[in-house]
Amino acid sequence: MIMKTLKNTLMMLSMLLCIVSIAKADPNEEKKKKETIDYTLTKYIEATTQGQTDDFHQYLDETFKIGINHGQKAKRFNKAQFIKDLKDQNHVILDCKSTFTIIEKSESCALAKIVMKYPAFTKINYVNMCNTLDGWKITDISNTLYL
């Protein structure tokens, strides 16, 4: 009887702790985290190198453009073209290590440099971002390959 009472008491205490921890969780805290420059850049890296493309489109501004420069060739793509290309590579994980540095930042705009080191080459992306009502959005990317 004592064991049953102790078991029930521990069960109730565990449930109470879960409820308290859930109640204390600030839903705005997660939203604030998702609205940061670092979070948006991390989502870009995850989408382009780890194939995690689900809902990535929300981090790109409607005016988004990407320029891809390789040697003497330069190409530009809009948001729809870029998202289609990413979705074609959904869940494909690339063999590269990525880091980013915020070069310049104000309350409304930021410029970041993303370095993606592959075994045979390095790709550098310069990412322009704007702070919108929905958080930081990527507006423009220029990238270059170094062999």
Image (tube, rainbow, N blue to C red):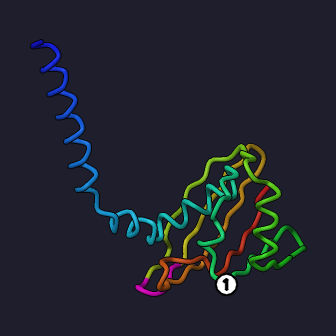
Considering every residue shown, the one lying at the far left of the view is 2
Q: Secondary structure at mark 1?
A: strand
Q: Residue at x 68, y 75 (%)?
A: 141
Expressed as whole percent of the image width and height from the top left, the position of residue 71 reads 87, 68
Q: Residue at x 62, y 58 (%)?
A: 45
Question: What count of labels does the image hold?
Answer: 1
Side (left or right) of 99 relative to 8: right
* Type of secondary structure dominating the magenta stretch: loop
Side (left or right) of 26 relative to 64: left
Identify the residue position indicated by label 1 in the image: 62
Q: Amino acid at mark 1?
A: Glu
Q: Residue at x 34, y 64 (%)?
A: 27
Camera-side residue of 140 and 51: 51
Q: Quadrant of residue 77?
A: bottom right
Camera-side residue of 110 and 61: 61
Side (left or right) of 94 relative to 103: right
Q: Residue at x 56, y 79 (%)?
A: 129
**What span is colored magenta in the figure?**
106-110
